[in-house]
Image (tube, grey):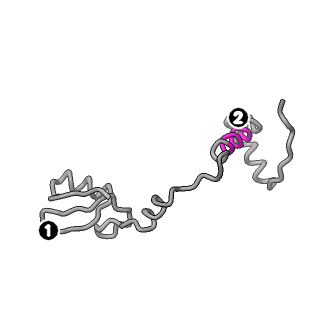
Amino acid sequence: MKTRSTIYIEPSAWKEFKQICNREGESMCEKIESWILQYNDRHRKGNPQLRIDYTLRLINQQKCGRDDCDFPAVGRAEAKTGWKGFLCADHYEQSRNARLLKSWKPI
């Protein structure tokens, strides 16, 4: 047996939600219930948090050493030209495919 509940929401948000559900042929109640069940599953044992070692790795993460690239590095490279530095996944693939790397160490 299901329970009737009341929520307070901005009228414009509710109206848009209703229009989207109608357009997609979805039940508003089933959509909300699905979200609540998923939330309960994720939080049943407490608030899901990242492990501290993963968080510290993100904080201390190196950036790609290529010009104007702000993507996080995935490894340390040494090029055949003598250049040493960190590379993101895209620049690693480009350098590897062009056979420019002397050595590679994932981080």
Q: Residue at x 29, y 70 (%)?
A: 67
Please state if 63 lies on the left or on the right of 8 as rendered. Answer: left
Magenta stretch: dominant SS? helix
Task: Say which amino acid is labelled 1.
Answer: Gly
Q: Give the SS element for disc 2.
A: loop
Q: Nearer the viewer, residue 39 or 80?
A: 39
Q: Which residue is mark 1?
A: 82
Mark 1 or mark 2, which is nearer to you?
1
Please state if 10 lies on the left or on the right of 60 as rendered. Answer: right
Q: Position of residue 11 (x, y in %)?
A: 81, 53
Q: Give the SS element for disc 1.
A: loop
Task: Say which amino acid is labelled 2.
Answer: Glu
Give the quarter of the image for residue 20.
Answer: top right
Instruction: State which region is magenta.
Output: 31-40
Q: Position of residue 107 (x, y in %)?
A: 32, 58
In the rendered image of this protein, does residue 28 appear above or below residue 52?
Answer: above
Give the quarter of the image for residue 3.
Answer: top right
Q: Position of residue 58 (x, y in %)?
A: 44, 63
Which sits earlier in the primary sequence, circle 1 or circle 2?
Answer: 2
Q: Which residue is mark 2?
A: 26
Q: Distance from label 1 to label 2 (Cα)? A: 59 Å
Residue 27 within the magenta-colored segment of the rendering: no
Q: Residue at x 28, y 58 (%)?
A: 91
Please state if 10 lies on the left or on the right of 89 as rendered. Answer: right
